[in-house]
Amino acid sequence: MHYRPEIDGLRAIAVVPVLFFHAGFDFIGGGFAGVDVFFVVSGFLITSIIHREIREGRFSIVSFYERRARRLAPALFFVCLVSTIFAVMWMLPQELNDFGKSLYALNLFGSNFVFWNETGYFAPSSELMPLLHTWSLAVEEQFYIVLPLFFLALRRYPVETVLKVLVAACVLSFGATQILARVDPAANFYLLPSRLWELGVGAMLALAGEDYFRLSKGFREFAAGFGLFAIVASYLLVRESAFYPGWTTVPVVLGTASVLAFGRADTLVGRLLCARPLVAIGLMSYSLYLWHQPVLAFARLRAIDEIRPWATSSCWGCVWYSPI
């Protein structure tokens, strides 16, 4: 797959609203939907890579996992190391214990399960969790485990058949959002079964191939523009809800798919996304996403510690809380 700078521009459109949302800017109350944009983009890119390599007969599942680890792990582990240092200095015993659980689970690609059990994403306490944002990385990594196995199991079937199976999986996943939102809203938000359809939409787009989207220039301009409008409107209009993801997630997901399919560099949206500032931010989007939540969480913890000076670190807090 050749490099598409407009995808990096789309990453910038995804990460900036997430940063603003976690920083507490009310004007972008739906900024958390930027994660949904990331999911669709990730599903599209990873499927494009795997499908091409399987078609060319050179796919290796070991090599695939090794490349993912080399790309994602170093920066993630460094963030964890720095976060651990500040957690030891500034967290109380219970806070440090919760941080340790999330840190342990993160290394097993399961931090989303920890946050599912501990807190709702929109709960006030979540603002003090330095690794809260890693739930989405865990969902993606779980998807990366399932997807290659899915393609290997169906490698002898034509693309059309694989596409139909993927469509069925996405329909079931979206159906799961309707059930989980009523039974367990936290599970609906954090777990892969109710997020699979978002990644799957990107995967379907990659399987469909470019031939399906070689339509007239006028149609592509309209579709890409409408897709970008749906993304921005979601950031401004969607609000925190127990039913997210669900029907309110559909516009941002389909909008992202539309931009990916039709917003090439020869369209107005494509040229906008190829702007150098957006591409630069997009190239840094993974690092920005990794660092923003720890920085914000520890800044808030430090501000709280100024109110509770008797417990400015978890170690000193142990002295006060433990029996002599």
Image (spheres, rainbow, N blue to C red):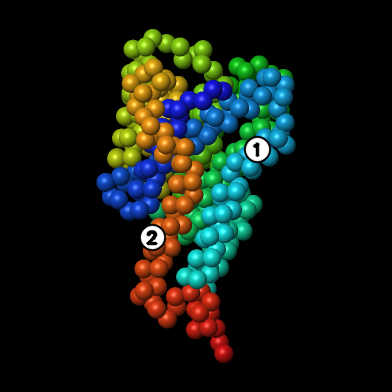
Task: Tell me the quadrant of the picture where the N terminus can be found.
Answer: top right
* Relative height, residue 309 to residue 54 (above, below): below
Disc 2, SS:
helix
Q: What residue did someone put label 1 on? A: 67
Task: Tell me the quadrant of the picture where the C terminus can be found.
Answer: bottom right
Q: Amino acid at mark 1?
A: Arg
Q: Residue at x 42, y 81 (%)?
A: 310
Q: Residue at x 36, y 23 (%)?
A: 271
**Whole-percent x and y of residue 10?**
41, 32
**Whole-percent x and y of residue 112?**
54, 51
Q: What residue did someone put label 2 on? A: 124
Q: Is residue 202 visible?
A: yes
Identify the residue at the far bottom of this view.
324
Disc 1, SS:
helix
**Whole-percent x and y of residue 295?**
43, 57
Q: Amino acid at mark 2?
A: Pro
